[in-house]
Amino acid sequence: MTKKITALRITLVFSLLGFAFLAILVLNVNTGSVSIAPKEILRIVLSGKSDGSSIGNVIWKIRLPRLLAAAVLGGALSVSGFLLQTFFRNPIAGPYVLGISSGAKLFVGIMMVYVLRYVSGVPFWAVMAAAFAGSMLVMLFVLMFAQRVRSMAALLVIGIMIGSICTAITDFFITFADEANVANLHHWSMGSFSAVSWPNLHVISAIVFTALALSFMLSKPISAYRLGENYARSMGVNVKLFRVALIGLSSVLSACVTALSGPISFVGVAVPHMTKLLFGTSKPAVIIPGSFLLGGVFCMGCDLIARTAFAPSELVISTVTAVFGAPVVITLMINRQRRRGDD
Amino acid sequence: MTDGYVFSTEGLCVGYRGKALINDINIRLEKGKILALIGPNGAGKSTILKTVTGQLPAISGKTFVEGRELSRWPRGELAKKLAVVLTERVRTEMMTCFEVAAMGRYPYTGRFGALTAEDKRTVRDTLRRVRADDIADRDFSQISDGQRQRVLLACALCQQPEVLVLDEPTSFLDIRNKIELLDILLETAREKQTTVILSLHEIDLAEKVSDLIMCVRGDHAEAPDTPDRVFTDAHIKELYGITQGSYLVNRGSVELVKTQGEPRVFVLGGAGSGLNHYRELQKRRIPFAAGILAENDMEFEVARALAQTVVSSPAFETASEETKARAEEKMLSCGTVLAAFDPAAQTANPNTGLLETARRHKLNIVFSAGELQ
């Protein structure tokens, strides 16, 4: 009886998310300094490329790439957060909270400021590599400390501290850098989905969707890991390999986001949690695709607000995601505390 | 060496970080047997269990399951032979009890862990066996400790193991849940021929549930032996290093430290009538003597554990005149008599005579410890 209700709920929520995804996509293309009729949007989008008209250019060169970037990166951040939460068995773990995004930012920053002196224009793959290296380095630090602390709050504090150190070092370099480079870096580090080019988007999408598929393949061991490392091992999970896979995939996913649009806050924590609440389960085979979809919807929504709330001024994307995401984190902390008080 | 044994260890040495804690552990278990590990806290029971289940590397020696060494089993195959219930607290998020139990099907399901109709039937049957079918749809994080332990046991049983290892499964449970859990284990061992290895704090329960007992004591583990040979008062006292108070094996009861000093009360008991009075006097810290008790009297051992002096007579014999004289002398020196037995009902009780003597000597006669001071 309840099995059927659960299955029905999952189908229903998926359809709802799919609908929301499409709706916000259309709304997003439609909204802006130039408003375009939905019929016109459909015609231009379906034609597959810009027809050369100004409206066509607005859609294909500005709005669509930005929008798709928001969708893909939002999804990537959410899945990255979910994998980290699984790894640390901690609902508030996430790439931003643990300082991993700041690590990526530090490395990208150093590269932008110092490499740009010698070569004009940094190739995107180099930014990507720097972001990944930074993510991994911070991840290693967090792992080192995480072995010694068991409490969720301590892990959070460690993440924030490491993040602050990275930000401090980044600021230090910025202080002594050329102004032109700084402007470049500053724009990037604020986090934004604007200025995403099609080729970069293609590269990132390929990586993100591969990582997403691999994460989905891990849903069985993730499922067992919900009972803890030792139980997972006793069921036959190769825990060492599994942990490496989790860390690798979540780092790749968050590095993609950071490389393309700078650090974005709280999405990785808030979205997986909201997804679990929506679906009423923590089954990874549902939560991985579910949080990818919801992450896309969430980020497109936040980007819409960032663009339009104080138009023509544009808000930093993290400002908007923080407004919605931070309360979720606080709620999680309070609930956890309360539950602990119970037992 | 390992033929015919479903589980065995050979010269196993366990410890942490390369440091040996317990050497030369040799266990051999046939199908359907229950082995209990007992011993004081920190003696290494958990370390042994973690090692034989592969959670902790062995320092040296080998563990065999169905004659094959632990490390030679492919992970997935071993999970079908060996299952565990751990002491650690499991915290889940939005997982029903059914889902938790169904994780035990892990070694049997395909790449994405989808449950077949048969898997689901196994899970439901197992939940019924551990008497948790009524909570199958409840959230695992919102049930009681006793229920949680049963669902985790169901998870392990869903692996359909040959060997089931449980680390202190009764620790957080109330007495009813302890009894029920051990009953399920006994049933599993007898009906499914599953071999069970568990560590227990409650030695009285260990005695009752297991076929073999292994005493673990910090630096070494004794060879597993049958409960009747392991459970003697002296052995248990020595194993746990009990220097004060006592543990009475036959009664399965713990008695606190006897009150020191010159006895002030003489308890006339018999046929269990003195039991509550001994404990009451102990709680009030009043030193006392007891008599005359036959050595097979149900309260004899408790009296011996708590009283300064016990005047006793051999089992199945009437008390000799000499015994009566000794009791009388002791009673007179105490000055106060606590008459616990019922003279009307126990006419053959030698204490009837002692009570009369007490009356003749106008001793202070009371009927409960509460009347003293």
Image (cartoon, coloured by chain):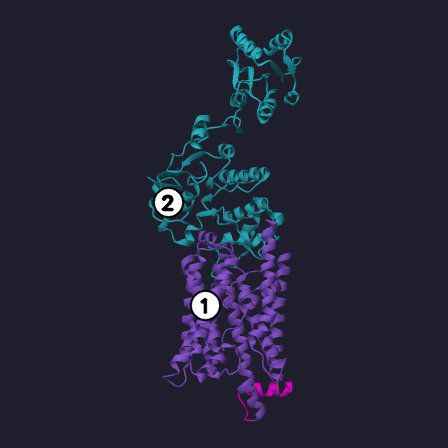
Chain colours: A purple, B cyan
Categorize mark 2 by other alpha carbons within 10 Å: few (<14), some (14-19), many (20+): many
- As for residue A293 lying within the magenta part, the answer is no
Q: Is residue B26 above or below residue A109?
A: above
The part of the image, by quadrant, that contains residue B14 is top left
Q: How far across and how far down the image is residue A132, in percent? A: 42, 72
User: Would you name the residue on which mark 1 appears?
Assistant: A165
Question: In this rendering, which labeled residue sits more in front, label 2 or label 1?
Answer: 1
Camera-nearest residue between B361 and A43: B361
Q: Is residue A50 magenta?
A: yes
- Which element carries disc 1, helix, strand or loop? helix
Asked if residue B360 can be seen in this view, the reply is yes
On the picture, is B72 further left or further right than A295?
left
Q: Amino acid at mark 1?
A: Ile
**Residue A56 placed where, x, y %?**
57, 90
- Residue B51 drawn above or below residue B285: below
Residue B349 shows in the view: no
Q: How many marks?
A: 2
Mark 1 belongs to chain = A
Kindly identify which chain the residue marked by label 2 belongs to: B
Q: Is residue A126 left or right of residue A157?
A: left
**Distance between mark 2 and mark 1 Cα atoms:** 39 Å
> Does residue A132 sit above or below B154 in this rendering?
below
**Considering the numbered disc 2 on the image, is that residue within a helix, a strand or a loop?**
strand
Q: Are marks 2 and 1 in contact (CB under 8 Å)?
A: no
Q: Which residues are magenta?
A: A34-52
Residue B87 vs residue A217, the one in the foreground: B87
